[in-house]
Image (cartoon, grey):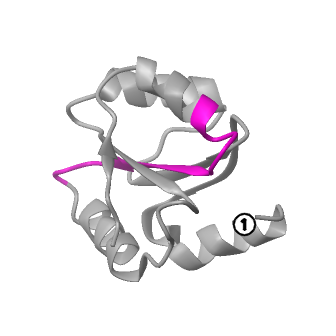
Amino acid sequence: MMTWQAVTSPQQLDFISERSHQVPCLIFKHSTHCNVSSIARHRLEANWDFDSDEIEPFFLDLLAYRKISNEISRRFDVFHESPQILLIKKGECILDASHLDISVEEIREVLMAVGF
């Protein structure tokens, strides 16, 4: 089962960066008024098969926290999209995907490629 941790302050990005040195962290930027975003979220949750010690999932309500989304784009050097996932490992974004390219399979492939 997937247990999201809400991102509600820019300081949490520091925590995510630091935490990603112990365990990969996933940030899901979700637009609560977008059907595609809802589909992407549902696909993630329905197919999530990671143990809690393998990856930590974080959830950003893009509409409520747009400034944090902008900071994510700046900090991890990615173009803003919605919906979007960023997989953070050792403080770096090793995967960003958006829309219907968001999948558990892609996350697993990238983790395997970097030796996790």
- Quadrant into which the N terminus falls: bottom left
Seen in the picture, residue 3 relative to 45 is either above or below; the reply is above
Q: Name the residue under label 1.
A: 110
Residue stretch in magenta: 18-33
Image quadrant assignment for residue 45? bottom left
What is the residue that sits farthest to the front in this orientation? 53
110 in the magenta segment: no
The location of residue 96, given as percent across then percent down, is 60, 52
Quadrant where the image shows the C terminus: bottom right
Q: Residues within 10 Å of mark 1 (few under 14, many from 20)?
A: some
Residue in view at x 33 percent, y 80 percent: 46
Residue in view at x 66 percent, y 31 percent: 77
In the structure shown, which secondary structural element does the residue marked by tag 1 occupy? helix
Q: Residue 79, position in %: x, y?
A: 58, 38
How many marks on residues? Answer: 1
What residue is drawn where x is 31% and y is 27%? 66
- In the picture, measured across the screen, residue 26 lies left or right of residue 69, that is right
The residue lying at 49 percent from left, 67 percent from top is 102
Q: Is residue 78 left or right of residue 66?
A: right
Side of 92 relative to 1 (left or right): right
Residue 47 location in percent, x, y?
41, 81
Could you tell me the amino acid type at mark 1? Answer: Val
